[in-house]
């Protein structure tokens, strides 16, 4: 059986790090800054998102949102909880569609919140709107 690997995106340089589960205080292999391993979603640009989904060894859940969108604000803590529960085996990020519109445009996003699940560099599932935590758990369960 292969050794389990977790993956985290370095908040300092964007490097994607494979980390052995249970290792304490991991540092980024690229910039040597401490790796954030809480699983809390961070906000990315189109270019940062593209790099992440092309290189992540674990699935990436992307929340396309805007600050003025009420359902987006309600969804945010739900997806933060999802990211914390699955830290290492899933990377949850968000994209502010007011500032970064390229990826949302390419994906045909017409309303927010819109959530896309990437695995191996491509979209494997998607959903729109405010949904409870169990719905997101179900969405990712087939892909972890
Ligand atoms: Zn780094």
Image (cartoon, helix red, strand yellow):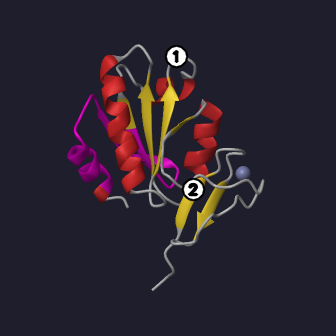
Disc 1 beta carbon < 8 A from ligand 1? no
Name which residue lies at 51% across and 71% down. Answer: 21
Q: Is residue 139 above or below residue 32?
A: above
128 or 74: nearer the eye? Answer: 74
As helix, strand or loop, the secondary structure at mark 1 comes to loop
2 or 1: tag closer to the N-terminus: 2
Image position of 62 (left or right of 140): right
Q: Position of residue 95 (x, y in %)?
A: 51, 30
Where the C terminus falls, by quadrant? bottom left
Q: Position of residue 114 (x, y in %)?
A: 36, 30
Name which residue lies at 45% across and 56% down. Answer: 87
Q: Position of residue 134 (x, y in %)?
A: 21, 48
Q: Is residue 125 magenta?
A: yes
Q: Which mark is residue 8?
A: 2
Q: Which residue in the protein does label 1 denote?
A: 98
Image position of 33 (left or right of 90): right
Q: Which mark is residue 65?
A: none
Q: Is residue 47 above or below residue 91?
A: above
Image position of 90 (left or right of 78): right
Specify start and end residues of the magenta stretch as a single range.
116-140
How many numbered circles does the render carry? 2
């Amino acid at each position: 059986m292969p050794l389990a690997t977790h993956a985290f995106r370095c908040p300092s340089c964007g490097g994607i790090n494979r980390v052995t589960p249970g290792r304490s205080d991991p540092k980024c292999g690229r910039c040597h800054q401490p790796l954030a391993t809480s699983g809390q979603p961070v906000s990315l640009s189109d270019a940062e998102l593209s790099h992440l989904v092309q290189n992540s060894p674990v699935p990436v859940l992307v929340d396309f949102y805007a600050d003025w969108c009420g359902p987006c604000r309600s969804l945010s803590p739900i997806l933060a909880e999802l990211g914390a529960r699955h830290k290492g085996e899933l990377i949850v990020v968000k994209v502010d569609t007011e500032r970064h519109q390229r990826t949302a445009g390419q994906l045909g996003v017409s309303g927010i919140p819109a959530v896309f699940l990437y695995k191996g560099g491509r979209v494997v599932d998607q959903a729109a709107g405010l949904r409870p935590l169990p719905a997101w758990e179900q969405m990712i369960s087939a892909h972890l």
